[in-house]
Amino acid sequence: MTTKRLGVGFIGTGNISSAYLRAIIGHDSLPGFPVLDIKGLADMRPEAAQARASEFGLEAMSIEDMLADSEIALIVNLTIPRAHAAVGLRALTAGKHVYSEKPLGINFTEGKILLDTANKAGLRVGSAPDTFLGGSHQQARAVVDSGALGQIVGGTAFMQVPGHEAWHPDPAFYYDIGGGPVLDMGPYYITDLVNLLGPVARVSAMASRLRLTRPVLSEPKQGQIMDVKVDTHVTGSLGFANGAVVQVGMSFDVAAHKHVPLELYGTEASLIVPDPNLFGGDVEFKKRGREEVWTPVPVTQPYADGNYRSLGVADMAQAILDNRPHRANGDLALHVLEVMEAFEVASREGRTVEIRTPVERPEPLAMSLKDGRI
Ligand SMILES: NC(=O)c1ccc[n+]([C@@H]2O[C@H](COP(=O)([O-])OP(=O)(O)OC[C@H]3O[C@@H](n4cnc5c(N)ncnc54)[C@H](O)[C@@H]3O)[C@@H](O)[C@H]2O)c1
């Protein structure tokens, strides 16, 4: 049983906050994360904080009161991408550790300032995604680390959808600066790839933005016209420091496709890695040869069978209490942000962009771990 707990406050209580709160409090068969002691919820719209607090039996408070509360050590920042850096800096200035939704900032400079500020203050930065800690992705990591693929030569990563305006109640931010398929969904794919393969060394890309406005398709804003300020169809290649080259497709313009989310190709075998936006899913393996059958890899790692969004926060809180590194950390998020920005630079300038930020693969989760413990 976890005995020590860390006081946590949430800023931003929109759509995704309910997934975090459900995973932390626990529901159905999910055990929750008792290490996280939720002291309060805040939002620039106090009514949104109050509504979410009432729903979960928690306390709503103002952002000022939250940042002044000495029992809160860690702020979970679930605001929109454009606000991530400003809200994060404000929390750091108040002496709080920060865990931010992705992306860490809407550009590399924002992310770097956030990390430099935290480092100077002796505080920590964590960032989504934490799905790479999910059981299926940790299982894929174990296969890669076993050497069963041989030398990894490359892979593919595809996230291609018609656009989030079909379901999100307030989707304009997906087409604003800080949005687009790369900054929105790239964190899941690139973080998972870095977890599997190590640092990215260079990026090439081409991108398009064929529709300059798009209508909201979901309620309550159905029919409102959104300006598109970012590229919505992006293709490119990631060259990893280990020599592997991965083809990438990220789009909000694709009606349908049949590519799997992630494939890795080795000299001895290939591996299918499931959707990095989810914690679970099927991992499949096929050896070189004529045999046509892909073998399912049994997923024995924990955190594979539900939405554990907040696992990265729980790991960060436990790491603070135990004085060890946390896995969904700022260095990893900054590296991923540099890679994502490089797609834009490579596409605009027609060149290959070198990636400079160093990163280490986070420690795998222990095979012996049980759901709810971290
Ligand atoms: N919705 C999803 O399924 C989903 C999934 C994974 C990650 N995310 C990420 O989570 C973040 C939030 O997404 P969402 O869908 O919950 O958005 P949302 O628009 O539903 O909610 C964002 C909330 O942040 C508040 N906010 C905005 N700026 C603020 C500021 N400066 N200070 C205080 N509060 C502020 C808004 O009032 C709103 O309540 C985004 O970074 C998004 O990429 C969303």
Image: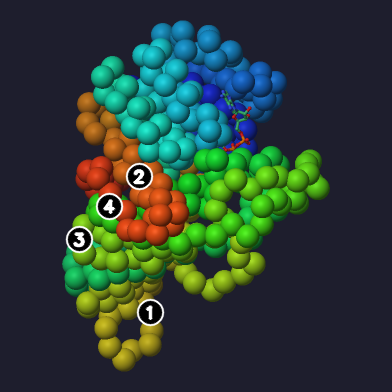
Which callout, 4 or 1, points at the residue further toward the start of the chain?
1
For ligand 1, tell me if the residue under mark 4 lies within 8 Å: no
Question: Where is mark 4, residue-wise?
Answer: 354
Question: Where is mark 3, residue-wise?
Answer: 242
Question: Marks 2/3: CA distance?
Answer: 18 Å
Q: In which quarter of the image is the C terminus?
A: top left
Question: Marks 1/2: CA distance?
Answer: 35 Å
Label number found at residue 338: 2
Question: Marks 3/1: CA distance?
Answer: 26 Å
Q: What residue type is labelled 3?
A: Asn
Q: What element carries label 1?
A: loop
Kindly report which numbered mark, 1 or 2, lies closer to the viewer in this rendering: 2
Is 297 on the left or on the right of 253, as rendered? left
Q: What residue type is labelled 1?
A: Trp
Whether 106 is drawn above or below 166: the answer is: above
Kindly report which numbered mark, 3 or 1, lies closer to the viewer in this rendering: 3
Is 148 on the left or on the right of 133, as rendered? left
Question: Where is mark 1, residue-wise?
Answer: 294
Q: Is mark 3 on a helix, strand or loop?
A: loop
Which callout, 3 or 1, points at the residue further toward the start of the chain?
3
Kindly report which numbered mark, 4 or 2, lies closer to the viewer in this rendering: 4
Kindly report which numbered mark, 3 or 4, lies closer to the viewer in this rendering: 4
Q: In which quarter of the image is the N terminus?
A: top left
Examine the rendering and report whether any part of residue 287 can be seen.
Answer: yes
Whether 23 is drawn above or below 116: the answer is: below
**Pointers 3 and 4 in contact (CB under 8 A)?**
no
Examine the rendering and report whether any part of residue 76 can be seen.
Answer: no
Percent x, y of residue 272 = 38, 69
Kindly report which numbered mark, 4 or 1, lies closer to the viewer in this rendering: 4
User: Which residue is painted at 33% across and 35% down in the image?
Assistant: 330
